[in-house]
């Protein structure tokens, strides 16, 4: 038998490889998925800079997670009507001018002022974030989501 007439695959064994994926905790780059799976706790260290309001120093991973969360919250009202109604409701956060603002305005300003520029969040700003998530848990996309807890490392207080 000549080499040209032989099947080139006769000397090779074919093995089937099965790749199984288990359901696991979402990655740190999916904050909404992580909130749907379990409670999330984030630690920070308070830093006072010539004011009575503390700025928050986070680990790199926690800061990245918060930035992704705020970015996703800016878009959450675009899909479901129930979430849009919540985002257009009045927030508990007051802007610098002291007037009322909607939750959508709150997250849009956080995203524009802090996330895009990389500036530090303050306790006064982020103390409202768990309240917003509690409201959104009554909506559609985050229905039944777990809680976000933000803890100060030194004093142990929670926002």
Image (cartoon, helix red, strand yellow):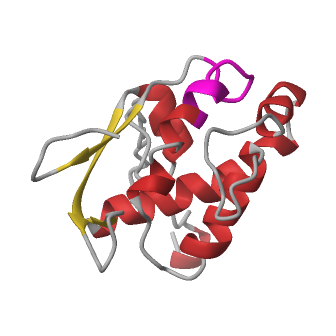
Whether residue 106 is visible, yes or no, is yes
In the rendering, at what x and y percent does residue 86 appear?
78, 31
The residue at the far right in this view is: 81
Q: Nearer the viewer, residue 51 or 41?
A: 51
User: What segment carries the magenta color?
Assistant: 132-143
Front one among 136 and 22: 136
Vertical arrangement, residue 145 with respect to residue 72, above or below: above
Give residue 130's position: percent from left, percent from top.
48, 36
Q: How many marks?
A: 0
> Which sits in the foreground, 36 or 50?
50
Q: Is residue 71 magenta?
A: no
The answer to whether one can see residue 10 in this image is: no
Indicate left or right for 81 with 151 as reference.
right
Q: Quadrant of the C terminus?
A: top left
Position in image of residue 105 (x %, y %): 76, 54
Residue 157 coordinates in the image, percent (x, y): 21, 40
Which residue: 76% across, 37% down? 90
Residue at image location 54% in from the left, 33% down from the top? 131
């Amino acid at each position: 038998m000549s080499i040209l007439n032989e099947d080139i695959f006769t000397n090779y064994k074919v093995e089937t490889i099965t790749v199984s994926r288990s359901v696991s905790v979402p990655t740190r780059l999916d904050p909404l998925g992580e909130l749907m799976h379990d409670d999330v706790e984030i630690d920070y260290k308070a830093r006072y800079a010539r004011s009575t309001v503390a700025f928050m120093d986070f680990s790199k991973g926690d800061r990245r997670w918060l930035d992704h969360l705020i970015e996703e919250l800016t878009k959450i009202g675009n899909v479901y009507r129930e979430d849009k109604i919540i985002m257009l409701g009045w927030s508990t956060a007051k802007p610098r001018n002291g007037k009322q603002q909607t939750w959508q305005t709150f997250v849009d300003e956080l995203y524009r002022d802090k996330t895009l520029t990389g500036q530090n969040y303050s306790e006064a700003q982020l103390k409202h974030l768990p309240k917003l998530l509690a409201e959104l848990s009554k909506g559609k996309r985050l229905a039944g989501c777990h809680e976000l807890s933000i803890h100060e490392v030194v004093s142990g207080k929670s926002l």
